[in-house]
Amino acid sequence: MNFNNMMQQAQKMQKKLQEAQEELAALEITGSAGDSAVSVTLNGQGKFKKIKLSAKALNPSNPNSVDTDTIEMLEDLVAQAMADATKKANDEAEAKMKSITGGIKIPGLF
């Protein structure tokens, strides 16, 4: 196998990997708990997308006492906290990897 063939194969593989990453980013996977009282949706890369709470999750003995505004506010707060924590974790991972690689950017590492 010559160098040109190897480069072509590497480019094809890189394109396939990029396509797979795009497919995973578009995929939505939902998990639930408490008989679907709480559900969380992630993309195929494990990134948080949204949370859905039911009234019975907040007040199991009297779910009718919980208004939709309260549920939406709590969902928004949890989503914001997840985004904040994710950003902080990514920043820490990137800083750690930079200290190891000496600042050299390695595709797919961070």
Image (cartoon, rainbow, N blue to C red):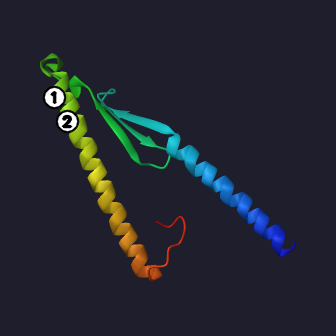
Determine whether, in the image, residue 43 is placed left or right of residue 86: right
Looking at the image, which residue is at 50% across and 67% down? 109
Q: How many marks?
A: 2
Q: Please say if the residues under marks 2 and 1 sit with CB atoms less than 8 Å apart.
A: yes
Give the quadrant of residue 91.
bottom left
Looking at the image, which residue is at 44% across and 79% down? 103
Looking at the image, residue 30 lies above or below residue 88:
above
Q: Which residue is mark 1?
A: 70
Which amino acid type is shown beneath numbered disc 2?
Leu
Q: Position of residue 21 (x, y in %)?
A: 57, 51
Front one among 63 and 3: 3
Looking at the image, residue 95 lies above or below residue 19:
below
Q: Position of residue 104 (x, y in %)?
A: 49, 78
- For the N terminus, the image quarter is bottom right
- Disc number at residue 74? 2
- Disc number at residue 23? none
Q: Name the secondary structure under disc 1.
A: helix
Q: Name the secondary structure under disc 2.
A: helix
**Mark 1 Cα-neighbour bin, 10 Å: few <14, some 14–19, many ≥20:** few
Front one among 25 and 65: 25
Determine whether, in the image, residue 104 is placed left or right of residue 37: right
Looking at the image, which residue is at 14% across and 19% down? 62
Which amino acid type is shown beneath numbered disc 1?
Thr
Instruction: State how far apart marks 2 and 1 are (Cα).
Output: 6 Å
- Mark yes or no: residue 87 visible: yes
Q: Position of residue 50 (x, y in %)?
A: 35, 38
Front one among 95 and 55: 95
Looking at the image, residue 106 lies above or below residue 48:
below
